[in-house]
């Protein structure tokens, strides 16, 4: 037994050295919870009545929106930043007032304020962001002016437009903040109160590029693009009867190019693309958007877009520019975020640059990220909420 103590000391030293040398898959720092949510035509009662439900009694619209607000607040309370789609309003001002009503409900539930940001749109729905004011990030800049930019043409594809343009926000990580915790939804009487008309945190005219000065912020920047691509419904010519997949491909290619140009300036940028792309995993839209598929291969030398917008050929893929976190996470295999044609489809995306994907990785697991889908269909939205957690070292 004389050798037991030296052996024990040696084992202890080996374990200690291994612990010092081990590098975690992601940081142990503060968490940042980023969410994406289609708000299902969310807006002021009079706007929803006028634009979407003119044949329904106003009392029914108000009652349904009060319930929807309660459900949305319950979903979103645990987020630090929410990329939102389908903010409804005939004008930029009315859309902002509707989003402010939701932000007021979040403030009542969480005890802190939420700033809101909305982009330009040629439609009555638009994209934007909600940002918790006590999160570990501060808004550095916002650009909602992409509606005035042309969508780059693709040879052989229909002309693309930004009917509801992307919104882009830059956030500076400023340090540790109280962890975002999921809180119970407030009682209907509180959350279902009349829309607030008070001051939104961001009062500049919607749609202009805006920059907010940051005092003492020195951490890394997180940049998020949120988008809502062409729906499966009408409004434009679809001669190929593919549920408008070619139009979505053109928009996806433009969005991928926006992400590529930003990463070309800084390959280690923490960049995410989030939103409702109206195409399931492995559709041409999602493959083009991640950078895995060169869009011109879809129609040259032969047409490879099949019925309903499916991929009809075995095409060569490239290394992705962005990691498709929800689509590729093993815990969400087969899960969908929207029910279309009696089938669950993953139409909502969280796409991450290499650095963002690294910060989202589950410790010790390959190609497994801290992501989730939350909510129930028709309780707040017809889409589930997507969520990713990032941690800094």
Image (cartoon, rainbow, N blue to C red):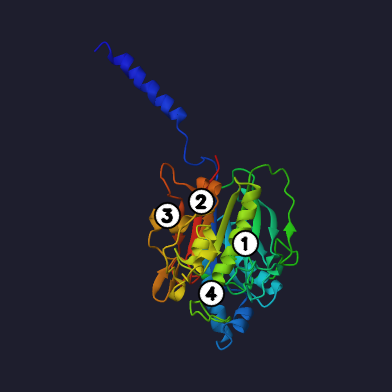
- Which quadrant of the structure image shows residue 13? top left
Name the residue beneath numbered marker 2: 389
**The label number, if any, that marks residue 129 in the structure image:** 1
Q: Nearer the viewer, mark 4 or mark 2?
A: 4
- Does dot 2 land on a helix, a strand or a loop? strand
Q: What's the CA distance linking mark 1 and mark 2? A: 17 Å
Q: What's the CA distance linking mark 3 and mark 2? A: 13 Å
Residue 147 percent across, percent down from the top left: 68, 69
Name the residue beneath numbered marker 4: 231
Q: Earlier in the sequence, mark 4 or mark 1?
A: 1
Residue 261 percent across, percent down from the top left: 64, 54
Query: Quick check: 241 left or right of 139?
Result: left
**The label number, if any, that marks residue 148 in the structure image:** none
Circle 2 Cα neighbour tier, 10 Å, few/some/many (<14 / 14–19 / ≥20): many
Q: How many marks?
A: 4
Mark 1 in CB contact with mark 3 (< 8 angstroms): no
Q: Residue at x 71, y 69 (%)?
A: 148
- Does dot 3 land on a helix, a strand or a loop? loop
Q: Earlier in the sequence, mark 4 or mark 2?
A: 4
């Amino acid at each position: 037994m004389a050798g037991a103590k030296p052996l024990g000391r040696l084992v202890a030293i080996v374990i200690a050295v291994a612990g010092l040398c081990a590098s975690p898959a992601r940081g142990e720092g503060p968490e940042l919870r980023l969410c994406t949510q289609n708000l299902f035509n969310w807006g002021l009662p009079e706007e929803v009545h006028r634009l979407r439900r003119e044949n329904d009694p106003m009392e029914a619209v108000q009652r349904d929106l009060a319930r929807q607000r309660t459900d949305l607040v319950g979903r979103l309370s645990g987020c630090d930043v929410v990329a939102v789609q389908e903010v409804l309003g005939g004008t930029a001002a009315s859309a902002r007032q509707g989003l402010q009503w939701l932000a007021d409900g979040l403030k009542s539930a969480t005890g802190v304020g939420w700033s809101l940001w909305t982009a330009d749109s040629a439609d009555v729905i638009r994209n934007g962001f909600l940002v918790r004011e006590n999160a570990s990030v501060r808004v550095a800049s916002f650009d909602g002016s992409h509606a005035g930019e042309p969508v780059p043409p693709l040879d052989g594809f229909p002309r693309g437009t930004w009917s509801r343009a992307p919104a882009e926000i830059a956030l500076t990580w400023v340090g540790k903040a109280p962890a975002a915790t999921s809180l119970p939804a407030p009682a209907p009487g509180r959350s279902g109160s009349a829309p607030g008309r008070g001051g939104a945190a961001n009062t500049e005219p919607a749609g202009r590029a805006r920059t907010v000065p940051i005092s003492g912020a020195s951490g890394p920047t997180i940049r998020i693009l949120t988008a809502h691509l062409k729906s499966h419904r009408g409004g434009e010519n679809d001669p190929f009867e593919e549920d408008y997949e070619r139009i979505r491909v053109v928009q996806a290619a433009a969005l991928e190019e926006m992400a590529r140009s930003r990463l070309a300036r800084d390959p280690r940028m923490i960049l995410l693309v989030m939103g409702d792309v109206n195409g399931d995993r492995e559709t041409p839209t999602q493959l083009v958007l991640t950078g895995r598929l060169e869009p011109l291969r879809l129609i040259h030398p032969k047409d490879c877009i099949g019925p309903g917008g499916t991929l009809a050929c075995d095409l060569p893929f490239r290394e992705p520019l962005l990691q498709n976190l929800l689509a590729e996470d093993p815990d969400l295999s087969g899960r969908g975020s929207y029910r279309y044609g009696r089938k669950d489809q993953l139409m909502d995306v969280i796409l991450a640059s290499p650095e963002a994907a690294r910060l989202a990785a589950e410790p010790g697991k390959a190609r497994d990220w801290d992501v989730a889908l939350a909510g129930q269909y028709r309780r707040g939205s017809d889409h589930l909420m997507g969520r990713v957690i990032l941690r800094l070292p």
